[in-house]
Amino acid sequence: MKAEWFILLCGCLILGLAGCSCKKSDRQQEILPVGAVDNTVGLNDTLGISLHPEYPVYSTRQKQIIFVLSNQSGMNISYGLDYRYTYEDEVGIWREISKRPVVFEVEYVLLHGDKQYIYADLYRNLPGRYRFFFDVWRYDRSYTFMAEFGLWDTNVVGK
């Protein structure tokens, strides 16, 4: 009787593991999970602070996008390294993109008259429109900045 239970248990384990290790088809790998609706908007230029992508359109082959944070506010501002993206789906709804699992929060100061390049990794490289969100602090108030850019099936980063 014990041997029958052991064989049954082993059979269930083998079937369970085999089912978990099935390889996804190429089509399934192309389809990314649909993110939650995220209609957040932000600023891209206010109080002398601005955020914009280095180029408005990038290739889908890009692994990083460069954003320019500029400070002409008359005072120092601070920022961290945390950011997030949304993308516009095929019916025009903005959806969130999965966030990075680990962020080391560090505060940086950007002096008046300076600019800083923000190198942001891409986590979704499908053609379309994207929004990049980045928080900046001035005194004790936080401002969410937003910059839009596009990804297209091209070989060249272009203006």
Image (cartoon, rainbow, N blue to C red):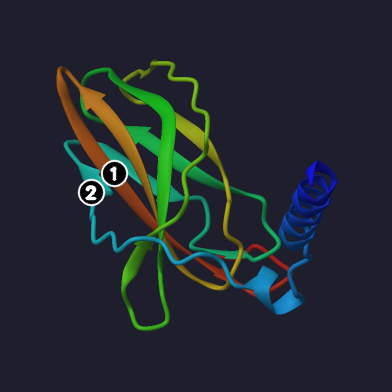
Is there any visible trace of residue 45 in the rendered image?
yes
Q: Quadrant of residue 137?
A: top left
Task: Kindly identify the amino acid type of the residue bearing the numbered disc 2.
Answer: Leu
In terms of depth relative to the viewer, which is nearer, 4 or 15? Answer: 4
Q: Name the residue under label 1.
A: 145
**Residue 111 screen position, x and y as percent:** 35, 18
At a point 47% along the width and 44% down the height, the residue shown is: 99
At a point 57% along the width and 59% down the height, the residue shown is: 124
Q: Name the residue under label 2.
A: 43
Dot 1 and dot 2 residues touching (CB under 8 Å): yes
- The circle on residue 98 is none
User: Label 2 neighbourhood size at 10 Å, few (<14), some (14-19), many (20+)?
Assistant: some
**Circle 1 — which element?**
strand
In terms of depth relative to the viewer, which is nearer, 113 or 60? Answer: 60
**Circle 2 — which element?**
loop
Task: Kindly identify the amino acid type of the residue bearing the numbered disc 1.
Answer: Phe
> Does 146 sit left or right of 47 as displayed?
right
